[in-house]
Image: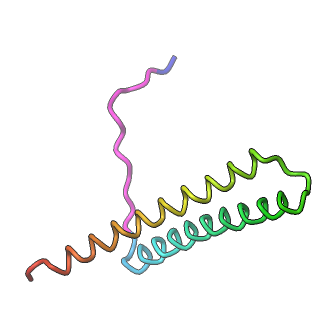
Amino acid sequence: METISPVAQPRTTQRISPYDAQQNFAGMLKDSINEVNNAQVNSDDMTNKLIKGENVELHDVMIASQKASISLSLTMQVRNKAVEAYQEIMRMPV
């Protein structure tokens, strides 16, 4: 029987170049923005279906709308924090 150690095992770190790190970060941002956009598009589609009288449940439309709203709010807050961090770095004396 195996026992679980309370101490986490150190992870092996592999070094990546600054270019690769930049590309990974840019890709992550692009994917995140695409997910927010997809949530907005899905919300719009479901709302339009409801307006046209198609077979869609009101609670599903409301859930999609709230998911889109929350994801957009989160994206804006992350952007604001990133801009604040950039501005703070620019104010630092060199």
44 relative to 8 in the view: left or right: right
Q: Is residue 83 above or below residue 55?
A: below
At which x and y percent is residue 69? 57, 59
Which of the two residues, 37 or 64, is positioned nearer the viewer here?
64
Camera-side residue: 69 or 21? 69
> Which of the two residues, 45 or 94, is positioned nearer the viewer here?
45
Residue extending farthest top: 1
The residue sitting at 48% across, 64% down in the picture is: 75
Q: Is residue 36 magenta?
A: no
- How far from the left and from the top, in percent, is residue 55? 91, 52
8 within the magenta span: yes
Residue range of the region highlighted in magenta in the rendering: 3-15
Counting every numbered tag in the picture gives 0
Residue under the point 43% across and 24% down? 4
What is the quadrant of residue 54 in the picture? Answer: bottom right
Image location of residue 86, percent across then percent down: 27, 76
Residue located 50% across and 71% down the image: 29
* Type of secondary structure dominating the magenta stretch: loop
Q: Quarter holding the C terminus?
A: bottom left
